[in-house]
């Protein structure tokens, strides 16, 4: 028996759950878990994640996708099917700050992310030893603000990565890069978006006397720090904190938010919808 994950989203309408369940039944399948959400049952948008098993003697991914496409076509839905346990390939881009990169590599080594990592690209050569300790390919590309060397990065990333994780990559990716790569890119921002965008969010928070600080992991779009939010982490602070303690707390929050976002994405629990996400 193989286990599959089905994601479906469309305008809400009657009969979606019934037809999807019937599709699984007719495919010799049995539902393990089913999550659904409607933004508004009267003309809103419907999201559904189903995990099910099916007899591999009767079905394969190709046959299931063919049948699923008929169901999706009936509802004018966007549907995706994944075989559970088949890992995605996650490329990593990182700059000199190493806490998020080290956290990702630690989780990878422990088998807690369930991905393949075809490469780590960095504009800081010193990360080579850390990456090679995990027997992963490392590419030093000395990109900077005046020469982002995006063509080189695209040539490495496009054919080998299903998505990219930016582990504190400190250069803004151009709209051309985002369009050329054509797949999801997940970033970590050291602040609670939509507040405190851009540079030095911890200093901004300190100046405003906020009572909590946080980190935000989000999809990358052409707008700076405006992509749909996947995960956030927060911690209370007080007047006793200074910039040093905020930075220490912030690094832990960044690691947590990014790892939470990556897990949700890798486990196929994330739906993008307009400027936000639905996460099961």
Image (cartoon, helix red, strand yellow):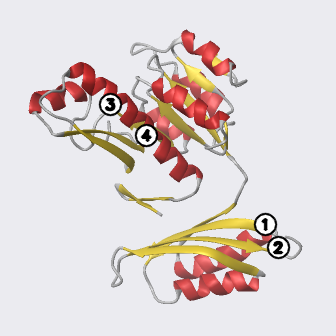
Q: Are marks 1 and 2 in contact (CB under 8 Å)?
A: yes
Q: CA distance from mark 4 to mark 3?
A: 10 Å
Residue drawn at the location 26% of the way across and 24% of the way down:
245
Q: Are marks 4 and 3 in contact (CB under 8 Å)?
A: no
Mark 3, Cα crowd under 10 Å, few <14 / some 14-19 / many 20+, is many
Q: CA distance from mark 3 to mark 1?
A: 41 Å
User: Which element type, helix, strand or loop, lies under badge 3?
Assistant: helix
- Give the image location of residue 273, x and y in percent: 40, 61
> What residue is pinned by disc 1?
2
Q: CA distance from mark 3 to mark 2?
A: 48 Å
3 or 2: tag closer to the N-terminus: 2
- Front label number (4 vs 2): 4
Q: Please tell me how many numbered marks the rendered image carries.
A: 4
Residue 168 position by quadrant: top left
> What residue is pinned by disc 2?
59
User: Which element type, helix, strand or loop, lies under badge 2?
Assistant: loop
In this view, the residue farthest toward the front is 240
- Give the image location of residue 207, x and y in percent: 11, 27
- Front label number (3 vs 1): 3
- Front label number (4 vs 1): 4
Residue 240 position by quadrant: top left
Q: Is residue 81 above or below residue 193?
A: below
4 or 1: tag closer to the N-terminus: 1
Mark 4, Cα crowd under 10 Å, few <14 / some 14-19 / many 20+, is many
Q: CA distance from mark 1 to mark 2?
A: 9 Å
- Front label number (3 vs 2): 3
4 or 3: tag closer to the N-terminus: 3
Specify whether residue 49 is in view. Answer: yes
- Give the image location of residue 178, x and y in percent: 48, 37
Can you tell which mark lies on residue 250? 3
Name the image quarter holding the N terminus: bottom right
> What residue is pinned by disc 4?
256
């Amino acid at each position: 028996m193989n286990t599959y994950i089905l994601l479906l989203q469309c305008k809400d309408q009657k009969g979606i759950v019934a037809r999807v369940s019937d599709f699984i039944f007719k495919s010799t399948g049995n539902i393990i878990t089913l999550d659904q959400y409607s933004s508004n049952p009267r003309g809103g948008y419907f999201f559904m994640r189903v995990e099910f098993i099916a007899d591999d003697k009767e079905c394969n991914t190709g046959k299931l996708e063919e049948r699923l496409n008929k169901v999706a076509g009936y509802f004018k839905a966007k549907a995706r099917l994944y075989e559970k346990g088949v890992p995605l390939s996650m490329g990593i881009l990182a700059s000199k700050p190493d806490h998020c990169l080290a956290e990702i590599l630690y989780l990878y080594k422990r088998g807690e992310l369930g991905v393949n990592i075809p490469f780590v690209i960095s504009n800081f050569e010193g990360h080579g030893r850390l990456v090679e300790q995990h027997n992963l390919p490392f590419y030093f590309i000395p990109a900077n603000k005046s020469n982002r060397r995006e063509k080189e990065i695209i040539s490495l990333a496009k054919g080998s990565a299903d998505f990219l994780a930016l582990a504190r990559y400190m250069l803004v990716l151009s709209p051309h890069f985002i369009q050329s790569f054509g797949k999801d890119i997940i970033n970590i921002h050291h602040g609670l978006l939509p507040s405190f965008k851009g540079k030095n969010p911890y200093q901004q928070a300190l100046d405003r006397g906020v009572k909590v600080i946080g980190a935000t992991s989000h999809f990358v779009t052409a707008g700076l720090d405006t992509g749909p939010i996947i995960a956030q982490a927060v911690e209370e602070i007080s007047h006793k904190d200074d910039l040093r303690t905020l930075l220490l707390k912030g690094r832990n929050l960044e690691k947590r938010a990014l790892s939470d976002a990556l897990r949700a994405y890798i486990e196929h629990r994330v739906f993008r919808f307009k400027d936000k996400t639905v996460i099961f």
